[in-house]
Image (cartoon, grey):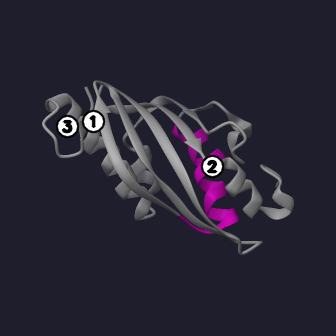
Amino acid sequence: MLAACGDSGGAGEAANLALVQGAYDAFAEGDVEGVTAVMADDIVWNEAENFPYADGNPYVGPDAVVEGVFARLGSEWDYWRLDVEDLLASGETVVARGRYQARHAETAAEINAQFVHFWTIEDGELARFQQYADTAQVQAAMPDGAAGDE
């Protein structure tokens, strides 16, 4: 059974929803430390196949996520926002569905791309992340449509 944010799917699911929502809120505020503070030391983070930053999959640990994903988003894009439309929990799994809103710094191309994130919560921390996204739209916004080129 899936519990939507605000539903009474059990205390554990409510806490898991709040944990993930808090991470998204921190990201929206540019609070990288707030995001990494709720990650397990050995978080396993996977970007979607063919996503520009999947070249480091799997990223293991918060430092790897910051260097391989967050820093690149910050340096290559004028802005990168996540608009979470749905947040659902089932046990230790939280699923987020929404859209990325972003503009590439070099090309000025803007995206409005769908995403789904699967989070696994263990011991009150973000333990695993799997992204699914409209990778073609993101790649098309980058220089020469090339993913991961630096």
Tell me where the magenta segment starts and ends, as one range.
62-80
Q: Which residue is mark 2?
A: 134
Percent across and percent down for residue 15 are 21, 37
Please give the residue where the numbered disc 3 appears in the rendered image.
14
Q: Is residue 85 left or right of residue 75?
A: left
What percent of the width, then of the height, locates residue 36? 44, 45
- Outermost residue on the right side: it is 144
Badge 2 marks a residue whose secondary structure is: loop
Please give the name of the residue rendered at 77% of the width and 72% of the height, measured from the top-left corner.
107
Question: Could you classify mark 2 by the number of other residues whose Cα lies within 10 Å: few (under 14), some (14-19), or many (20 or more)?
Answer: some
Does 89 appear above or below 96? above
| Residue 70 drawn in magenta | yes
> What residue type is disc 2 on?
Asp
Q: Quick one: 40 or 58, which is closer to the camera? A: 58
Q: Are marks 1 and 3 in contact (CB under 8 Å)?
A: yes
Between disc 1 and disc 2, the foreground one is 2
Residue position for label 1: 16
Q: Nearer the viewer, residue 6 or 39?
A: 6
